Every structure is written in C-alpha cells, then in structure tokens.
Image (cartoon, rainbow, N blue to C red):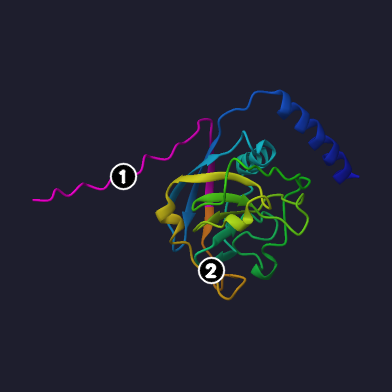
Amino acid sequence: MRKALLGSALLAAQTLLAAAPVAATGLEIDLEGEAQGTIVIDLFEETAPLHVERITTLAGEGAYDDVVFHRVIDGFMAQTGDVEFGRLGQDMRYAGRGGSQYPDLPAEFSDEVSFERGMIGMARSNDPNSANSQFFIMFGPAPHLDGGYTIVGQVVEGMEIVDLIRRGRGRNGSVVGEPDRMVALRVRDDDPVAPPPEEDDEVELE
C-alpha cells in the first residue's frame, strides 16, 4: 500500500514538474579514500527532471553520506548511490542491490546528451524504468549506453579526483577491502559550468 501511495505521489510530482519552470541545479560531492577532494556536478534538470529531483532530495536528506563506490571498472565507470546496502560499515556483499524508500523512476532517455567521459548515468536493473538512487560516473566514453540509461549530469570540476577512485576486481568491478566513499553532498541552486579547454601554446617555427 505504501508503494502504491508513493507511486501516486510520484505521478502527481511528474505533472507538477512538467508544468513548472525548471530550476538550475548543481551538486558538490566530497570524496574520501584513495580519491580525496570535492567534485562539482552540473545536473541535467531539463532532460532528466525526475532523476535530478530524486538525487537532490536524497542528497538534502543526507542519504548519500558515507555511501561507497561499490563497483568500479577501470576505463569504464565508478558506481555508487546504494543508500540501502552501500553505506560504509555494512556488508558489502549486498551493496548494489538496494535503493531508497521512494518508488523507482521512469526512464528519461535523451538524444541531446551522450555517455562521454565525466557523464553521470542512473544505474538500473533489466527494467529500463527501475532507476532509483544509484548512479555511476564515466571514466571514458561509452556510446553503447546511449538510449539505455538516463544521463542525469556531468562532472565539471574534479575529474582528476574521480580518476583516483579505488578500482574493483574482475569483470564486475567489485571493490575488495575498504571502498572509497562519498562523505557529504551539497545541492547548489546554480548551474556549474565546465571551464573552457586549455589551448596548447603554439610553437613558432624559426
């Protein structure tokens, strides 16, 4: 019954989001472990408003604090966000199986964005409409994910920190030992923007 009521509330929220103007939203995440520092994320509230609302809600509630990166595949992505089973100190054998108390979200696929380095996608099960709280950060491009996973944002500062997240083992990328974790998240009401790429100094030929 509680899931049904939450589902009805979600449908109502979708209607309100569609009718209301979209606010600019960013996110700061403090990491600890082999990767230490703060990353800044621009959330894509125009193409994935429901998923942005979910992440900012959970961040505001402190649900992501001390949640680990339980699955990290070198050259591919680092996955986190299991607010049910993925908190530091819990049994990591169950990390990746949980979600929040809120209902799963309908997919918000978009052809306006692609899975490039630094993009953030929403993890899900085989059902495209099963994303909930977990997300992953791309180490490199993965265009084969386009149209199959909702892209919710992009790292605009701190990819050099993301690159240091402790890697997992095997094809599944399960992290052995103490994983890196998110220790604090802060929602911003502005849209963080990536700095312009640095131009290489031109070398003059004599």
Closer to the eye: label 2 or 1 = 1
Look at mark 1 in the image and give the residue it sits on: 198
Q: Earlier in the sequence, mark 2 or mark 1?
A: 2
Seen as rendered, the residue at the extreme bottom is 170
> Is 183 in front, or is 202?
202
Residue 96 in the image: above or below residue 39: below
Q: Quadrant of the N terminus?
A: top right
Look at mark 2 in the image and give the residue it sits on: 178
The quadrant where residue 136 appears: bottom right
**With 192 as the anchor, is 43 left or right in this view?**
right
Q: Position of residue 140 (x, y in %)?
A: 49, 58
Q: Majority secondary structure of the magenta segment?
A: loop
Tell me the element at label 2. loop
- Please state the total of marks drawn on the protein image: 2
Span shown in magenta: 183-206
> Is 70 in front, or is 19?
19
Question: Rounded to the nearest whole Å, what is the CA distance between mark 2 and mark 1?
Answer: 36 Å
